Image (spheres, rainbow, N blue to C red):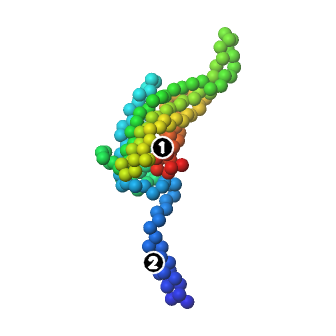
Amino acid sequence: MKKIYSLLALISLLTLSGCTVKYNFTGASPIEGKTFQVNFFQNNADLIEPGIDREFTLALQDLIMNQTNLNLVSSNGDLLYEGEITDYRITPMSASAVTTNGDATASQNRLTIRVMVRFSNRKKETDDFEKTFEFYHDYPAQSQLVGSVLNEAIRDIFERITQDIFNESLAKW
């Protein structure tokens, strides 16, 4: 009986090792290429928050490295991501009470960040695109957008935008 299980295991192993279909758990389509490059995303927004350009560039690099087997290179990548942060704005979202002088105050504010991305695939130029990605984070109006409030907002926004870029460029969703 033990020999039959061993024989079945060996046959299964040999059969499966011959398969050439690649599966992954990230949803990425089979990727044509071995390397990727993420150029620095300059902050060209009217309102400048120092350091978010570097944070965004690193967040995009990290996401692609963590969800693919592509190697990060500084030049001549098979896949190229470049662009700029085009908008960083804070807007009041909902009015709460009216003050004694008749002014309405906001109960919630929204930070919105917009990023323009140019994606190039040297191996498959039909995948190339130029597209804007945007997301927001709401926070209480009585909070200042500094420190942990700012860090949480930027982390949430960049997590969503980088995943959307990944989906558009590699997962084809």
Picture residue at 41% right of the left edge, 30% below the top: 43
Per the model, the C-alpha gap separating discs 1 and 2 is 38 Å
In what element is the residue under mark 1? helix
Image vertical order of residue 154 relative to residue 75, above or below: above
Can residue 56 be seen in this snapshot? no
Residue at the front extreme of this rendering: 126
Please provide percent x and percent y for residue 90. Answer: 54, 26
Label disc, if present, on residue 92 of the rendered structure:
none
Image vertical order of residue 149 relative to residue 76, above or below: above
Can residue 123 be seen in this snapshot? yes
Residue corresponding to mark 2? 14
Nearest to the observer: residue 121 or residue 1: 121
Nearest to the observer: residue 41 or residue 107: 41
Please provide percent x and percent y for residue 55. Answer: 42, 38
Please provide percent x and percent y for residue 140. Answer: 61, 29
> Mark 2: which amino acid?
Leu
In what element is the residue under mark 2? helix
Residue at the top extreme of this rendering: 101
Residue corresponding to mark 1? 165
